[in-house]
Image (tube, coloured by chain):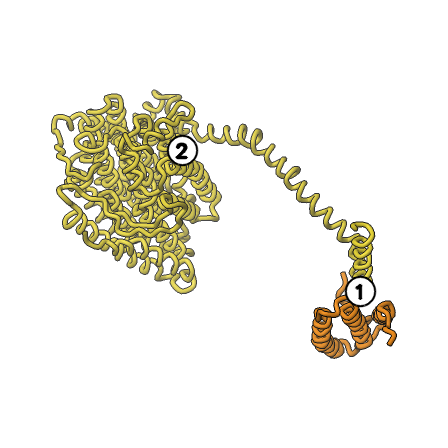
Chain colours: A yellow, B orange
Amino acid sequence: MSNYLYILWIPLLPLATFVVLGLFGRKYFAKTAGIISTASLLTSTLLSFVAAKQYFFVDGKVNGIYQKIIALKYTWLQFSPNVSIDMGVIVDPISVMMLIVVTSVSLMVHVFSLGYMKGEERFATYYAFLSLFTFSMLGLILSVNIFQVYMFWELVGVSSFLLIGYYFNKPSAVAASKKAFIVTRFADLGFLIGIMIIGFYGGTLDIGVLIQKLTSAQSPEFLSMTSASFLGASMLTWGLTLIFMGGAGKSAMFPLHIWLPDAMEGPTPVSALIHAATMVVAGVYLVARLFPIFSMDEAALIIVTYVGAFSALLAAIIACTQTDIKRVLAYSTMSQIGYMMFALGISKNGGEAGLGFMASMFHLFTHAFFKSLLFLGAGSVIHMVHSNEMKDMGGLRKLMPITHIAFLIACLAIAGIPPFAGFFSKEEILTAAFHENKLIYGVALFTAALTSFYMFRLYFNIFWSKEAPAKAHSASHDHAHDDAHNHGEGTWTMKLPLLILAACAVGVGFIPFSQFITSDGAALETHINMVFSIAPVALSIIAILLSASFYKNHNTKSDKAVAFFGGFYRAAYKKFYVDELYLFITKKIVFPLIGQPIAWADRNIVDGFMLLLANTTAKISSAIKGLQSGKVQNYALFFFGGVLALSVLFIYIWK
Amino acid sequence: MNEIPLTHILFLSTALFFIGMYGLFTRRNLITMLMSIELMLNSVNINFVAFNKYLFPDKLDGLFFSLFIITIAAAEAAVAIAIIINLYRSHQSIDVDDATEMKF
């Protein structure tokens, strides 16, 4: 077994960058922060590729099975001989894959931001936050202990909060960051309880040991956990469901998805990094990491499946109606993550039936590239027209040829048109769904068609629709460029990531993914069945054509469709009133019925008792403070008096 | 030879003690107060020695106590005089009524 210790440097370099830029950035590196941060991340990225090459091609495989390697484990807090919080580095197929995804997408975003964020006042702070985020995400990936996962999970949440609220003088950004933080925090509460349940019954927090203990149906831990039940479900189901709740919060699954669209208030490259490619798949990663345990519990998997499928469908419907291009992308992200979730949910552990697991990871991998490409492309467009609204765009294909091509590739990839990356992974998911659950397959197919429709609605609205506009400049823009200059597509630092990611969006689908990443580590034979692919691809093409007929040239067909759907359209446009429902629950039920009585009790009973103590003490002390006269002889007199009294007491009374 | 009775000695030491106490409460001069304290300490010494002699003639505990007290009284005098000197430096006086800052 060779040494993987150098993997430790992959998260530590961004951490070092964060510390340096966070402490000294604004003073000393105001201009060079981007370069420093990018260089450090480039090193991390190269190390990740070295690690991937070593793991996948040199020594990860033993007897045809990829091993889980614990490269480092340091016991940090020992609670009992079995239970401890460890810090460590795990090397296995999914963690290595995620290393590649996170570092390369993050690198692209760093490079893109060099152009996009140029001239920002808090440029160094921005890069410090980006580095913090990258560090937390990498730490999360490499965790060996479920509590380590939890800590990095929270760090990821914090850095997401900081980046969404980057424009802190914009009230909507502040509200969005608060919303994201509170919603994910609420979900994390479930995660924490889930960890405690699993840790209590499993007797350990170490992921490897937990999997080992809870996957054998005869082990005492497994038996005690499945026999103990609460409200009709076994503790295993409860634990896993609560952990999944944490994952659903981060991955924006219904009904905890409400923060993701608002999170688009952050700078667009941040949306590409956090809210499309990396952080939001943390939930998927968490389920995948604990997948052997999930696969032991039918009920938890069913929850994962249906939450995923429902979120995929719901988000796709909402995405068809939104007009803010970043919101469309946000809902599309939610939809694609729904895909990954239900692919996990329908999977079994190991062998042929583990196709769903592999497909989910594959989709995670390809999605990271084409979705970050979409976001960076949208960033480019927003940089150009200074607006997020579709109506301010149109006919941009001549003005931004590179962005146009890259965006088109990404749209084709997400629509699942061969030979682009999304086709392969989506095909695997559909195949897995077809074999396991026909209902889910139907939902997935319909969602795939919707996906093509709304992506090309976006594409045509941005790049076609109207003739090239005379420079459109709207008042609502995303960044601090005060001069309305006629820049082209942006600097080469903005074009280069688009080109690289476009190449990835074309190319990564050809990676024989099932050879490397499967639920049990053994290679899985997959084959794209041409006949099977006809249905989804044909549906996607029909959806694209429909979209083209609606939006390619300005016409009234789309308005007619809107009129046709009527109330349903309005409901989807209003995101099915989920936000309003949340507001109703919090403002009308939680605040007056729970919050205010507790606040009253706090003000009057808790505070009242403390005030009583303080007031009594103050009164008594002011009454007797005259005794402190400062005269030595007075003190001596009291002393003698006291001694005398005590003597009398002891001699005559307490004989 | 007629032995002096214990009560005489106790009377002496009690008188000495209350003289010291009177001095401590009435004098305002720190040196005088220190001297009064010495008086009180010595009255205790006398008690120790007397009781040792009259009640436990074959033991020496009382003598040892008084030796200890003498030693500690010396140390205490040194400390007290040091304090007095410092007080004089800061207040230009060794009158206790001039040093009443340590009040509420």
Above-or-below relation of A384 to A418: below
Label disc, if present, on residue A256 of the rendered structure = 2
Disc 2 to disc 1, C-alpha distance: 72 Å
Percent coordinates x, y for residue A272 in the rendering: 32, 44
Q: Residue at coordinates 23% horizontally, 21% vertically from top-left? A: A438
In front: A493, or A7? A7
Above-or-below relation of A520 to A588: below
Percent coordinates x, y for residue A34 in the rendering: 33, 58
In the shown orientation, is residue A564 left or right of residue B12? Answer: left
Label disc, if present, on residue A100 of the rendered structure = none
Percent coordinates x, y for residue A172 in the rendering: 46, 42
Q: Which amino acid type is shown beneath numbered disc 1? A: Ala
In front: A642, or A317? A642
Residue A120 sits in which quadrant? bottom left
Percent coordinates x, y for residue A302 in the rendering: 31, 26
Q: Residue at coordinates 35% horizontally, 51% vertically from top-left? A: A75
Q: Which residue is mark 1?
A: A636
